[in-house]
Amino acid sequence: MSTDSVEAEAAADMCCASCGTAQVDDIKLKKCDACDLVHYCSDNCKQLHRSEHEHPCKERAAELRDEILFRQPESTHLGDCPICFLPLRTDHAKSMMIVCCSKIICDGCVYADKRHRHRENLQQTCPFCRHPIRKIDEEANKKLMKRAAANDLVAMRQIGLKHYGEDDYVRAFEYWSKAAQLGDIDAHYELSLLYTQGQGVEKDDKMQMYHSEEAAIGGDPRSRIILAHCEWKNKRFDRAVKHLIIAANLGHYTATRALKLCYAEGHVSKEVFAAALRAHQAAVDATKSPQREKAAAADCY
């Protein structure tokens, strides 16, 4: 592209897409919020240009959304165990939420703490903050409510789970909605399930997809499986495969099994499948430790 063409394109970008007014010191143009493709000098010009811009705007907005959606997260939303600093496993059964400090502790550190207390004949305390463990449900609930009132995301999520277990889906929806608004990835995942089942809220496929995508973007591999299933039903196999590869790279076992089926049906090349398996194994190996292996053998929960 010539220098003149670049300069002409840059000049066009700094003009109102509706009336052609150029940006000068006393006139500031605003980008289209959805696509960032065009500028407008006023809300009136934006409205007048809407019919002409609507289609390319939606296309570009979808492209931008996909760029974010199919970006490989560096790790899962779970993060690391705050004690051993190793990545938490994608299997939620391999970790424990401690009420006193709202920390998620891996099974290896829980096991090591139990062994230490048994050897030294110590009272039961939190493996992280060493606060005495609340054995009375009422005290634990008060602690959770206090932390939830301070916008603790883990506490809000746990209270939502408690209400869900009691079939109080409306209250579960309320807590998870607030947690999701504050950025909790697990809450987005739980909300997607509520919208799918119509529990505590009317069934809504669009909202289900929205919360699944938000959870997936945040690093939740379970939501990738849900999205892959939805794309597969719609015969958009390339998008389904992308979700499965991302989930496999994060260490999710179910994704590797699904990719194996995709490979058998010719939707994934041998090279891509092999690369996904290697990345999956690397992610799994990163979560291993001698303590966690001992915990698994002892079934510490």
Image (cartoon, helix red, strand yellow):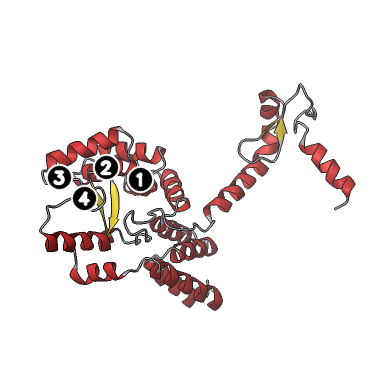
Q: In 3D space, how far apart are the residues under numbered discs 4 and 2 (Cα atoms)?
A: 22 Å
For label 1, the residue is: 187
Q: Earlier in the sequence, mark 3 or mark 1?
A: 3
| Percent position of residue 6, x then y | 83, 46
Q: Amino acid at mark 4?
A: Cys
Secondary structure of the residue carrying tag 4 is loop
Q: Amino acid at mark 1?
A: Ala
| Percent position of residue 198, x then y | 32, 44
Q: Identify the image quadrant of residue 93.
A: bottom left
On screen, 70 above or below 257?
A: above
| Percent position of residue 99, x then y | 22, 45
Q: For the point 67% across and 44% down, which residue is it? A: 56
Q: Identify the image quadrant of residue 113.
A: bottom left
Q: Is residue 238 left or right of residue 188?
A: right
Q: Is residue 225 left or right of residue 95?
A: right
Q: In 3D space, how far apart are the residues under numbered discs 1 and 4 (Cα atoms)?
A: 25 Å
